[in-house]
C-alpha cells in the first residue's frame, strides 16, 4: 500500500481537484488521521455531490466502525447515484438489517426485484440473514446458477 499511496501522492498535484482531495483523504485514512479523513471527505462531497465512489468510501468507514446509523445516509446516496448498483443495494440492505429495520430492508428487496441476478441475490441475502442454508441449496440447485461464492458459503460443489 505504501508504494501505491506514494505514487498517488506524486500524481495528485497534476490531477483534478476532486481526485487530489480523494487521494489526500485516502492518505489521511491510511495514516490513521481520522478527523482529517472525515474533514476532507465532507469537503469532497460538498464540492462534488455526485462523486459516487466517495459515498461508498464514507459509508464503508462508518460500517467498519459499526456505526451503522452514520453509514446509512452515505449508502442511501450511493444507491441513488449508482442507480442501485448490485453492490450498493446489497450494502444498503445489510445496513437496514444491522439497524433492525426489517421493513426498510424488505422495501428495497421488493423495489429492485426486476432482474434475474437480483432475484437470486435476494434469495441468497434472505437465507443468509436467517442462516437457512437448506433453502439456498434448494433454490440454486433448481437453477442454472454457478456462483463460486455461494458454493463456498454452502460448502457445496454440486450447484
Image (cartoon, rainbow, N blue to C red):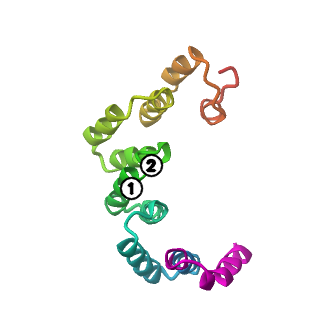
Marking on residue 75:
1
Residue placed most toward the observer, 12 or 16 = 16
User: Vertically, is 78 above or below 149?
Assistant: below
Q: Quadrant of residue 26?
A: bottom right
* Residue at point 45%, 29% (across, down): 115
Q: Main secondary structure of the magenta part?
A: helix
In the picture of the structure, the residue carrying the numbered disc 2 is 88
Residue 121's x, y, as percent?
Answer: 48, 32
Start-end of magenta stretch: 1-21
Q: Secondary structure at mark 2?
A: helix
N-terminal of the pair, mark 2 or mark 1, is 1
* Residue at point 45%, 27% (across, down): 119
**On the picture, is 66 further left or further right than 111?**
right
Question: Is residue 8 rendered magenta in the image?
Answer: yes
Residue 113's x, y, as percent?
Answer: 39, 30
User: Vertically, is 77 above or below 122?
Assistant: below
Residue 72's x, y, as percent?
Answer: 34, 56
In the rendered view of the protein, which quadrant contains the C terminus? top right
Q: Are marks 2 and 1 in contact (CB under 8 Å)?
A: yes
Tell how many labels.
2
Q: Quadrant of residue 130?
A: top left
Residue 156's x, y, as percent?
Answer: 66, 26
Residue placed most toward the observer, 95 or 37 = 37
Question: Is residue 117 rendered magenta in the image?
Answer: no
Question: Which residue ends up furthest to the right in the rendered image?
Answer: 3
**On the picture, is 16 further left or further right than 98?**
right
**On the picture, is 80 further left or further right than 27?**
left
Amino acid at each position: 500500500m505504501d508504494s501505491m499511496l506514494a505514487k498517488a501522492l506524486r500524481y495528485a498535484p497534476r490531477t483534478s481537484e476532486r481526485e487530489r482531495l480523494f487521494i489526500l483523504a485516502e492518505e489521511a485514512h491510511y495514516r490513521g488521521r481520522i478527523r482529517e479523513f472525515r474533514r476532507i471527505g465532507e469537503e469532497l462531497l460538498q464540492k462534488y455531490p455526485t462523486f459516487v465512489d466517495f459515498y461508498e468510501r464514507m459509508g464503508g468507514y462508518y460500517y467498519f466502525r459499526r456505526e451503522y446509523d452514520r453509514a446509512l445516509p452515505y449508502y442511501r446516496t450511493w444507491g441513488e447515484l449508482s442507480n442501485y448498483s448490485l453492490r450498493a443495494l446489497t450494502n444498503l440492505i445489510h445496513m437496514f438489517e444491522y439497524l433492525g429495520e426489517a421493513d426498510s430492508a424488505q422495501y428495497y428487496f421488493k423495489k429492485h426485484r426486476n432482474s434475474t441476478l437480483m432475484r437470486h441475490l435476494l434469495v441468497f441475502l434472505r437465507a443468509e440473514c436467517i442462516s437457512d442454508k437448506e433453502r439456498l441449496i434448494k433454490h440454486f440447485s433448481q437453477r442454472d446458477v454457478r456462483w463460486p461464492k455461494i458454493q463456498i458459503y454452502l460448502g457445496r460443489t454440486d450447484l
